[in-house]
Image (cartoon, coloured by chain):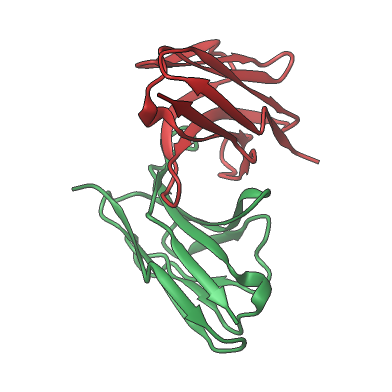
Chain colours: A green, B red
């Protein structure tokens, strides 16, 4: 089944404890992206990647890191999480054109205490 | 500043009725406009994608329209069903090749029996 998977789905952590949220897609998509969704603000793009070893900042990249060493994986790294990073995070992927449909993962709900 | 605004914020209708959701955007240069359906706690699912040259796109009971001159789009839902209860999000992509997406905050639709 074609899908985007994220792990973990739920995570509660404390301020400053490094964490990684994994994202994987099995559709051989070139493009992958991370978003966060907060009440009243809609989804905002954190980082995106147009292919292996190619990443770029979205609208809210501060406090996050990404890497794209393999085509199928695009992990989101929080080196020193803070409470304002408590949010619902979505990973998405699509083919190599900005016209292609984006497929979203199921989401990761992160709480930073 | 590139923005996408949706109205109304929320809407309640009876099963079987039609409804229209609105999206206004200021994104320029513009590549394409998408409508997504997002069930509570789940990732968005694509309904339609339109470029600036397309006026109408349908997907079953969902019909999206686009007026690139006035920078307005609408999503019309025909013969609503209980399963249409969800948030509907308008997303505009900046000029082709940038892969940057601007999301509206969504319209929360509730369909009552």
Residue A74 location, x and y as percent?
Answer: 42, 65
Quadrant where the C terminus of chain B sits is top left
Q: In this view, does B74 lie above or below A44?
A: above
- Name the outermost residue toward the front: B113
> Which residue is found at the position 60% from the left and 80% from the top?
A81
**Residue B58, quarter of the rendered image:** top left
Q: Which of B104 and A79 is in front in this view?
A: B104
> Which residue is found at the position 75% from the left and 39% from the top?
B2
Q: Which of B25 and A14 is in front in this view?
A: A14
Q: Is residue A55 above or below residue A29?
A: below
Q: Which of A106 and B41 is in front in this view?
A: B41
- Name the outermost residue toward the left: A1
Residue B40 location, x and y as percent?
Answer: 45, 47
Residue B25 location, x and y as percent?
Answer: 71, 29
> Which residue is found at the position 47% from the left and 12% from the top?
B17
Residue A13 appears anywhere in the view: yes
């Amino acid at each position: 089944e074609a899908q985007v998977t994220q792990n973990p789905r739920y995570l509660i952590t404390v301020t400053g404890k490094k964490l990684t949220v994994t994202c994987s897609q099995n559709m051989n998509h070139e493009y992958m992206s991370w978003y966060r969704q907060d009440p009243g603000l809609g989804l905002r793009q954190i980082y995106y990647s147009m292919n292996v070893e190619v990443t770029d900042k979205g609208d809210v990249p501060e406090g996050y890191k990404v890497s794209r060493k393999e085509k199928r994986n695009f992990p989101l790294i929080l080196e020193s999480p803070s409470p304002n990073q408590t949010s619902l995070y979505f990973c998405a992927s699509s083919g190599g054109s900005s016209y292609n449909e984006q497929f979203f993962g199921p989401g990761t709900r992160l709480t930073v205490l | 500043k590139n923005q996408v605004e949706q109205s109304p914020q929320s809407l309640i209708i009876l099963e079987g009725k039609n409804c229209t959701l609105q999206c206004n955007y200021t994104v320029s240069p513009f590549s394409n406009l998408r409508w997504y359906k997002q069930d509570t706690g789940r990732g968005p699912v694509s309904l339609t994608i339109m470029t600036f040259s397309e006026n109408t796109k349908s997907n079953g009971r969902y019909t999206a329209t686009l007026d690139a001159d006035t920078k307005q789009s609408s999503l019309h839902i025909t013969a609503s069903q209980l399963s249409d209860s969800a948030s509907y999000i308008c997303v505009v992509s900046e000029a082709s090749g940038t892969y940057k997406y601007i999301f509206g905050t969504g319209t929360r639709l509730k369909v009552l029996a």
